[in-house]
Amino acid sequence: MRQAQLEIVAAPSGGLLPAKPRTNLLFSSVLLALVAGVVLVWAAMSEPARAIVGGARAEPPIGQALVMVLVEGGGACSGVLVTPRAVLTAGHCLPKGRDIRVYAPSPDTPGPPRLIRPVASAVHPGYVQNTLGSRRRSIDLALLRLAEALPAPFLPVSLAAISAPGAGDTVIVAGDGLSQEGIASSSGTPRSISLPVVEPYGRGTILLWAAPASDTGGGACEGDSGGAILEPQGALVAIIAFAEGLGRARCGKLTQGVLVAPQRGFIDGTLAAWGESARWTDHADGLR
């Protein structure tokens, strides 16, 4: 049975209440350019790039598991390395008919950024486009396979096989998207923020939500789709899919992710077909 990316919860009246629509984070305002008419690269940035509103630069173990997923025509997402050659991201980050590149910058490797064409991809069979605001079921996950393993300092993350965190538990939200909404140059470097889990629609079996404890704002922003929601010890709990902002803002109020443990069949099955395997853990140590 397919599980839903759009969580359906019981309303007080006994009817069904769809989860409130979130902002689709795929098509961020990050600028992309074509090099030699084929390869996608970032437009020149005049200042250091950042990600995740209200956060700080991600510590190395988390930052080393993050890459960017670039879409032909100007879209940008984040992605999480789950094996040396496989990236887990959001399904809406792989629109049909568009070329995809994985951008894997490394401070230890001089020269131009590496833009890697995936050799295979798989979108969750339960993913359905354009389900925001509807009651259609959709699982917003996808995998990318690279031709070669990413070298050090990149480090795959382990996936949490245990039950999802509950309300009040702390998770780490991390990605390469915007740290300042609407400012393209504020993306590109991994950032993270610790947030408490919230349950605005009851405890999710498919989705996980996190929100700042105050109205100061913090969480995923444009370009963070496909990024990570982790336990404090580093195990990957969910993949970022949507966000909601305060007032007219699009970011910083609520971050929503798709839990990975319920989708283990898809993840393990796809990786096995590619000759890969992820590490699942029931323990606290999530980073290899």
Image: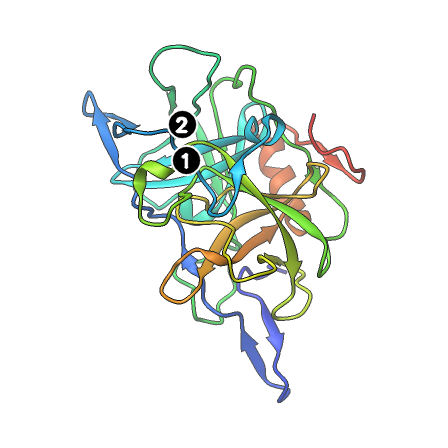
Residue 110 at what x, y percent from top left?
Answer: 40, 10
Image vertical order of residue 197 relative to residue 7, above or below: above
How dense is the environment of label 1, judged by Cα within 10 Å: few (below 14), some, or many (20 and up)? many
Q: Closer to the camera, 31 or 116?
A: 31
Quick one: 270 or 226, which is closer to the camera?
226
Quadrant of the frame with the C terminus: top right
Q: Is residue 59 above or below residue 122?
A: above
Which percent across, then down, holds residue 213?
61, 59
* 62 horizontally vs 246: left or right: right
Q: Position of residue 104 (x, y in %)?
A: 44, 24
Mark 1, residue position: 69
Give the residue type that dot 2 points to.
Tyr
Question: Which element type, helix, strand or loop, lies under badge 1?
Answer: strand
Marks 1 and 2, the one that precedes in the sequence: 1
Residue 18 to residue 90: above or below: below
In the image, farthest residue toward the top? 110
In this figure, what is the number of numbered marks?
2
Residue at the image point whose x is 32% and y is 29% from the top: 47
The kind of residue on which mark 1 rests is: Val
Residue picked out by circle 2 = 103
| Label 2, residues with CA under 10 Å away: few <14, some 14-19, many ≥20 | many
Q: Are marks 1 and 2 in contact (CB under 8 Å)?
A: yes
Image point (47%, 44%), residue name: 52
The secondary element bearing badge 2 is classed as strand
| Residue lying at 68% horizontally and 33% vertically, measured from the top left | 158
Give me the C-alpha separation between circle 1 and circle 2.
Answer: 6 Å
Q: Residue furthest right?
A: 283
Residue 261's x, y, as percent? 68, 48
In this view, the residue in front, 166 or 196, is 196
- Say which quadrant the N terminus sits in: bottom right
Give the left or right position of residue 174, taking residue 269 as reference.
left
